[in-house]
Image (cartoon, grey):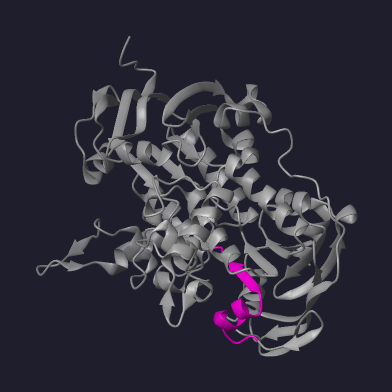
Amino acid sequence: MFPNPDFILQVRGLSKSFSGVKALENVQLDVRRGEVHALMGENGAGKSTFMKILMGLLAPDAGEVWFEGERLTHTSVHAHLAKGIAMIHQEILAVPALTIAQNIFLGRETIHGFWRWLNDTDINQKAAQLLRQVGLSRSPQTPMKDLSVAEMQMVEIAKAISQQAKVIIMDEPTSAITDKEVTTLFGIIRELKNQGVAILYISHKMDEIEQIADRVTVLRDGHYVATEDAQSLTTNALIAMMVGREIATLYPPSERTKGEVVLSVENLSKAGKFENVNFEVHAGEVLGMAGLMGAGRTEVARALYGLDPADSGQIALYGQVTTIRSPKEAIRQGIGYVSEDRKGWGFVPMLSVKENLSLSSLRQFARNGWINTQTETENTEKMAHQLRIKAANMHQKVTFLSGGNQQKVVLGKVLLALPQVVILDEPTRGVDVGAKFEIYTLIRQLTQRGLAVIVISSELPEILGLCDRIVVLSKGKQTALLAQHEATQEKIMHYAVH
């Protein structure tokens, strides 16, 4: 029987192409009321296109979408919201100059009086209640631009709840929030389930799927693979469904003994951000940096790269004390940096793959003020091949690549500048398990070439699986420096909340 009344959302035969390239072909999906249904697949599997169709942002070329027994023929976000389908986007869609309350109720403001003034008092009261529900201790009148990325994500969750949706699509909702906030989010999801709300949950974090999902649907290369009960799936089986092959171990073993000290930091401090940070990183070593959101990890990285120079302390490269006041100086001295915010700081969206890859190393390709385009093309194509960047061609704009391939472009840009120290801030945020494995393999290759690598990550399994030593920060202070053999998740968390 179709449509089936047991399901709130049903999809059959969904297909979509762009310029002749098939993003989706004959995809199906069934979602029950009050279930968490995980949608899994590598970057480029078609998940984003699928979600855009469900939200009314795109019209399918073929296929049907049924919601509560009614076929959806509208292709507008407003129409789908009115039906009861809401979405929390991975890329936060906020108006920075407006307040939290104004962002939550944007387009749904309440008005009063003869002159139909906006009733800010009403939306502030409603927003305050929603913020308490999601555990965010902020005034509803706080401008969005004053929030951290994690706080903005919690506001997006509050907005979805306020829309009283019957199906909520969550696209990587935990990619920028702390473990404490994840616990709060999972509590909210369970409450929504009890109210009969269906959650379509997109994540690359296997442990989250185990904790929260009831069923899992897998897409691969735009095709439907299977739908299974989450509890019956092992992690290895799920990975094999996603990538079409088994990955024996996610973290490649270290095969190089560490060499000389490349970078050392002594009593590095920046007022209000971090103080008296001390560590060194050797050639052929991966040094991890762990801590909760706001611990100062990113701030230390930005200081080393000259984006926000430290107020005091000492930085030395190969034993020589140096001063780094700008990214230009950092690049010249052999330091590369991959930001946690790849779209904000990592690449220029409307430039091509080639142009982004060569952005930090144009000096290498220039002679007498002119760029040797042949040399530039040869080097960027070689890097794209090494990193297995999937793009239509080197002239494709980076904004149209999947998240994993965008991250590879950012990594390639840094590596083309021939650094000796590479700082990777959340290098696998928002990328799939296949791309993660490729990035981990690349990190191992860098250390085998004698580079010093610093990895900042909120994923403790990643820190433990990759890093030779681990610096732990808490509230801007260094609380521990652990060797790999003595580090555990429990011990890192102990020092992270110290």
Residue 347: image x %, image y %?
45, 64
Residue 332 colored magenta?
yes
274 left or right of 145? right
Position above or below: 320 against 371: below
> For the magenta stretch, what is the residue range?
324-340
**Relative to the observer, which residue lies in front, 237 or 98?**
237
Left or right, 484 with respect to 315, comes to right
Would residue 211 be found to the left or right of residue 175 on screen?
right
Determine whether 176 is above or below 77 in the image.
Answer: below
Q: Reply yes or no: does residue 483 show up in magenta.
A: no
Q: On the image, which quarter does residue 297 sit in? A: bottom right
Q: Is residue 286 left or right of residue 76?
A: right
Which quadrant is the N terminus positioned in? top left
Question: Which residue corresponds to the image point at 49% horizontal and 40% vertical from the top-left?
Answer: 202
**Rendered location of residue 340, percent (x, y):** 56, 63
How many numbered marks does the figure carry?
Answer: 0
Locate the C terminus and report the quarter of the image it occupies.
Answer: bottom right
Residue 182 in the image: state x and y as whole percent. 59, 50
When the figure is inspected, residue 237 is found, relative to residue 473, above or below; the finding is above
The residue lying at 54 percent from left, 48 percent from top is 385
Outermost residue toward the top?
A: 1
Can I make out residue 347 in this image?
no
